[in-house]
Amino acid sequence: MFAWKVFALISVCAALLWQGRPAYALAYLLLLFFFAAPLVLEKSGQRLVVERGSKERFLFPGDEALVSLEVRNPTLFPFAWVSVQDSIPSNLVKGARAIRPVFTLGPRQSREVTFPLLARERGVYRLGPLRLFVGDFFGISTCQFQPAEGETVVVYPQILPLPELALPSRLPFGSLKALERINPDPTRLAGVRPYQAGDPLRTIHWPATARTQGLQVKQFEHTVTVNCMILLDLFEGDYEVSRFFVATERAVTTAASLAAHIIKQGEACGLAANAVLSEYWPERTDLSHDTGLIQMRARQGTQQLSALLSVLAGVQPQGHKDFLSLLGESREYVDGVSILLWVVPVDTPELVAAAGRFVQQGQKVLIFAVEKVIHHSLVAVPPNSSLQVFAVSQGGELQP
Amino acid sequence: MTAKGYLPALAGVFTASALYLCAQYLSLLFAPLTLPSWLWPFVLASALESAYYAAYFLGPRTPFTVRLLELALWLVPIFLLAGRELSVFLWPALLTLVSWLVARGWGMQLVRMEKVADVLGDQAASTVSWEYESLTSRSQDDLALGFFWRRLLGFGAVVVTLATLVYRSGLVEGSLSVLLKLQATVAGASGLALLGGAYLFRLQILWSYAKAVVDPGLTRAWFRNLALILLFVVALVHLAPVNYSPITAETVAGLAARLFQPKIELPQLEEPVPGEGPSLSWAEQAVPQPEDLGIMGLALAIAAFLLLVLFVTVLLAAFGFIVIQLTKGELERLRGLPKLAVEIYAALRRAAAKVLAALRGLKISLPLGKRVKLPGMRPPGGGEQPSRRRFPSLDKGVRALLRRIARQAGKKGLRFRASQTPREFGQLLQGKLEHSEELVEQFFQGYHLARYSGHQLSGAQEEEVVAAGTELLQRIQTWEGDSKS
Amino acid sequence: MTTVRDVAEFGQKMLDNIGSVLVGKEETAHLLLVALLSGGHVLLEDVPGVGKTMLARAMAASIGGSFSRIQCTPDLLPADVTGLSVYDQKAGDFVFRPGPIMSQIVLADEINRATPRTQSSLLEAMGEGQVTVDGRTYVLEQPFLVLATQNPVEFEGTFPLPEAQLDRFFLCLSLGYPTAAEEKEILYRLQEGHPIHEVKAVTTPEHVRRLQQVVTKVFVEDSVCAYVVRLVQATRQHPQIQLGASPRGSLALFRAAQALAALDGRDYVLPDDVKQAAVPVLAHRLMLKADSSLRGVKAGALVNELMRQVAVGAEHLDELGENT
């Protein structure tokens, strides 16, 4: 390009010296093509606007989606060709390779381009950076730009019906709802009802009584509820190397399936995991991803399920916090929860001993072993037992 | 047809016009080099033939005798037309040969561009993309179309040099000057068009290797925008100010003369002998004043250019007609120039058919109010209470008009989808048709009243609405369409 | 005689009046008028502090009607809503003390904090237009509009309205946060006092009742009626929707389209009116499948998708020469 620019300057000098329209014409042409046009192309290209259809997207494995982008030219400069390359992680690419659209963009024109996605594996992925290539009509210059817009794609873990994990579908409650309520919590008012013989006088709701002219007593929520807490072990040292990926994925799938099952039953569910989060995290969450600890309080509802699944989509194993540390550091979240669901590779004696301590406090502990079961006696206990072990199997046999 | 189909034609036109222009300047400077008037078609035809042959048929195994025969095809008639006089034959033959050879180079370059895999290696070619394009553009080595630029600017430099010499000699004036400018415009425009087309061709090859998804409308838009750029360039070179430099060759020469005069004796320049031909003594001859082409001249140049294009198109269409008659349906075997001619003929036929259909449609869509009364269009009789109907079958003129408008717009790429309301379709039309907002509003308001209000339109109302709809239909018919849809 | 022109004038005056209190919410106010003219009730799903109370008060003041506010809490009783009979010792008889439901414009704030029993009493009053207390029936004065609010983010201690109850609301709207320019305007307007105190009535409840009658007479051509039905039926067949809109939804859409046409000064409905009303009328009536919710699919987006798919009119298709 340098040589051509020198030639252009020489022609300008020649035109100035020689005079005459032919010489000036050549000089103007060369100035236009080798100086003005590349500059205008670059300046106009910097003003191209790229807008994504959405900033976040949620998919299940196997889902297909279309990522749409709008490329807008707010200038009067016509772009001979524009090419868009969106960096799509290989786990999301549909087909052999990511498509790369090419189109022309006239003055003040906009064009929508779409990229197909196929969610193959769970994870939190980041689409981008986006690269825009633009060029002129004569092959003199091309420019590349990188608009800052990105998009997060969250592929939830697979949710399977419990029987597909070789788990009983009555989990985790069994007949828990029929249990007697133990201790009403005086700080959690659930409503009022008419007085019945035997109600303590201190529970009378006097303002309601005055309004209704009939004795009304307060109703409270009870300390023992059916709140559940899933504790997921993703400590690398606890898993066998040979089956590491399969076992950890099974653990995440088990946790996700349990959470979905519990919340669909209308109960509250929380999550604690000794894991780290994927680096590409949706901005709306404030979970830390560098302490090796993830904790979410038990809550009800579809939004809670969505939040749990989003976290489970992004969890990755880590190597410095084991499961017992997780138990120790999650007391605040675990206390007050009636059912603990531990998703671990193996039901080791230490874990069973720790579970026994929780059982003594009145909580129910269900251990889901995704690799191997040691305490077969705990597998065969009656369904209402406070401590049970389940062997999780997903289309294959567990190690004996 | 890919870009390659048009490029040899552009190459041929550029080569012929640039060479002929140079030859004309030379003939003005040197009398023995005058050109016979019948030479131009030979130069053009030989360039076209050579370019197409090289692009589609020539190969390393083409026998040398075939190439000699090809050349003889052009030189022998020239020899005969030159009256078999060698002295008369040599200059035209040389020009034709040069044109033929240069055009051959263009054709062979196109073939080389297609074989990018050979250049890059198969593996590299399968992953090549426009990053490659960027890299080559930013490299110090060459432009992506260095071959084309070198030739183009090479010709440009030669033409400019010769033209400057000629104009400074004062040898050109009047109609000759206009003709030369026109030729220069044709040469320049065809050269730039060739460059633009070649770049598109190159990109198409790279994109096919990179498996890019190319917008189908890109080629059409490319050439449309290229035409606009060429128009801009033509206007620029003809209208831009010139000769404003305070430092010219004369002033530099004068300065040098003053500086070195005591030391160097300048040779005495001989006075030009009348009748000996043009003198190149710049110091003595008055510098010709720069002339402005003016708007008329520019218009004339553009008109002449368009006439030339029209002439070539008609010629090719006629050739295409003959080819079709001769080949009788085996058109898929055609290549190169015959295929181009057939395609031009077919395109002209389609265009003519569309024009006829449009004229027929215009005739049918004239207001019906005065001619035919459709059933159900009776106005409410005396004493009858105007009742609202839930199943209106009236005002078919308005509804029929919407059907026609929808069909016509659909042909132009603006589909009226089943899930769109008439108002949404109207808004779409307002966005696409320029200066038609009020017309669209008037028609669709009337349509709404006719269709959804349960009342019948009065005669005057219906006439107004139908008139608005008819005009809208005409505007859609003359609209060039929406290539995006 | 009251005509659609009066409806359009009424609409403009009301919007101007409400606009003097609430900045930049013309579209929401417009839809609120649609609900008022259609005799329906509105659910406002929004975060606190965006102007829901002001909107209700401005509307009440503009029509010259009574206004009351119910702050729903878990200990709110049905009698707190409907009213109750209290024994008056002096009179020697029970005296009925009407509850806040007896006003013409009622704002039920955070309805999802009331217990299901209390919610039912409110919803019954909305549905029947009357309340029964101690065996006596009290007819609620028309026009009667309930604006219930619900926080879109679920917190502990709430009783979210079940989907079946949501169907009873004519429209579901959201005010949303104001833009930066609007918020700036709000600060200037409220600098020296609240403009709600200066809002004057532009009409009377009697006039609003007559306008409601006019709206019911707006002409709906057969293909538009069929379009309403097709759209609602499509919500029952969409693969991502577990439970589509009920016939109550069809009726609400029909009525809303009439009201929109009347507010536009037309005595006939266009398919565009149906489209304009579709999302606010239908979105909250749809129960999405769990998977769809988890994928971030919104009911409003599904309604928009259906509008892009469902044909506007069978006769229309014949005109286009297309088939479904």
Image (cartoon, grey):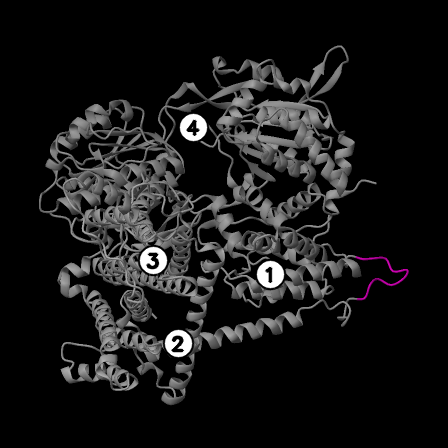
Estimate how packed mark 4 is, as few (under 14), some (14 to 19) or many (20 or more) residues with alpha carbons within 10 Å. some
- Mark 1 — residue? B475
Question: Percent x, y for residue A96?
Answer: 23, 58
- Compared with A33, A267 (above or below) is above
Tell me the kind of residue under disc 4. Answer: Phe
Residue A90 location, x and y as percent?
23, 50
Q: Amino acid at mark 1?
A: Arg
Q: Which residue is mark 4?
A: C155
Say which label, 3 or 1, has the lower sequence index. 3
Q: From the viewer's perspective, is the residue at label 4 or at label 1 nearer?
A: 1
Task: Residue at 12%, 46% (x, y): give it.
Answer: A243
Does C30 sit above or below residue C218?
above
Residue B167 numbered tag: 3
- Looking at the rendered structure, whether the residues under marks 1 and 2 are on a common chain is answered as yes
Q: Disc 3 residue type?
A: Tyr
Q: Real-space Cα distance between discs 1 and 2?
A: 29 Å
Residue A271: x and y in percent read: 28, 33
Q: Chain of mark 4?
A: C
Judged by its main secondary structure, the magenta piece is loop
The local secondary structure at tag 2 comes to: helix
Q: Residue at x 42, y 27 (%)?
A: C156
Q: Nearer the viewer, residue A217 or C296?
A: C296
Rendered location of residue B133, percent (x, y): 23, 53
